[in-house]
Image: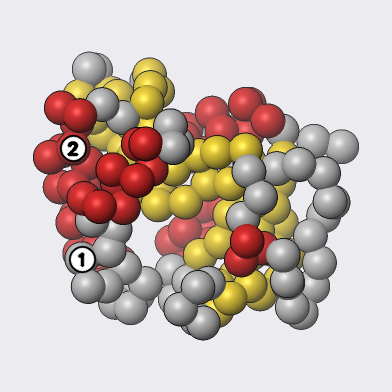
Amino acid sequence: MDIRKTEEADIPQVLAIYEEARKFMAEAGNPSQWTGGYPGEEDLRRDMEKGASYVCLENGVIAATFYFSVEEEPTYRVIQDGAWLNDRPYGVVHRVASASRGKGLASHCLNWCFDQCGNLRIDTHRNNIPMQNMLEKNGFARCGIIFVEDGTERIAFQKCRE
């Protein structure tokens, strides 16, 4: 599997993967995390402009997508019911989505991100049990609760090299 930055020609496929992920989340008991067309083309283009949108290719075909950047995430400044593992600079991962389940695509993407910086933070919805399980399987520690811009809570995770 190869990972590269998202290109203009990738947009239709990435949007299709987002749509597939929305359906999967709803079927898995998490109908409220990605609603109202989020993430959509505007979100994707903003991520691309920042140089933070990536695709994972399997046999030359886009199989997964994610946002990754080494930056401060404003919604991570305050964490409740716990604490971050450290205060060092960190990479942020958002909008992880894959075209198929059970192939380890999301794990591969997260491992790639971890290889880039060795200190990752990510959050997910309380009802997104598949994502929580995948994060824990990949060595992420549950750190506490953060609140995203619309005020809804997310479970915050972190993985770091010691």
Whether tag 2 and tag 1 are in contact, CB under 8 A, the answer is no
In percent of width and height, residue 135 lies at 57, 52
The amino acid sitting under disc 2 is: Ile
Query: In the displayed structure, does residue 143 sit left or right of residue 121?
Result: right
Query: In the displayed structure, does residue 3 sit left or right of residue 93?
Result: left
Q: Residue at x 29, y 46 (%)?
A: 44
**Picture disc at residue 37:** 1
Whether residue 120 is visible, yes or no, is no
Whether residue 43 is visible, yes or no, is yes
Please give the count of numbered marks on the rendered protein: 2
The amino acid sitting under disc 1 is: Gly
Query: In the displayed structure, does residue 141 sit left or right of residue 24?
Result: right
In percent of width and height, residue 39 lies at 29, 58
**In the image shown, does 41 or 59 lie closer to the viewer?**
41
**Picture disc at residue 11:** 2
- Locate the N terminus by quadrant: top left
The vertical placement of 161 against 148, above or below, is above
Q: Classify mark 2: helix, strand or loop.
A: helix
**In the image shown, does 78 or 13 lie closer to the viewer?**
78
Q: Residue at x 87, y 37 (%)?
A: 162
Q: Mark 2, residues whose alpha carbon is within 10 Å: few (<14), some, or many (≥20)?
A: some
In percent of width and height, residue 26 lies at 26, 72
**Picture disc at residue 47:** none
- Residue 154 placement: quadrant: bottom right
First in sequence: mark 2 vs mark 1: 2
- Residue 24 placement: quadrant: bottom left
Q: Residue at x 35, y 46 (%)?
A: 46
Q: Residue at x 51, y 82 (%)?
A: 151
**In the image shown, does 19 or 87 lie closer to the viewer?**
87
- Residue 36 placement: quadrant: bottom left
Mark 2–mark 1 Cα distance, whole angstroms, equals 15 Å
Query: In the displayed structure, does residue 85 sit left or right of residue 2?
Result: right
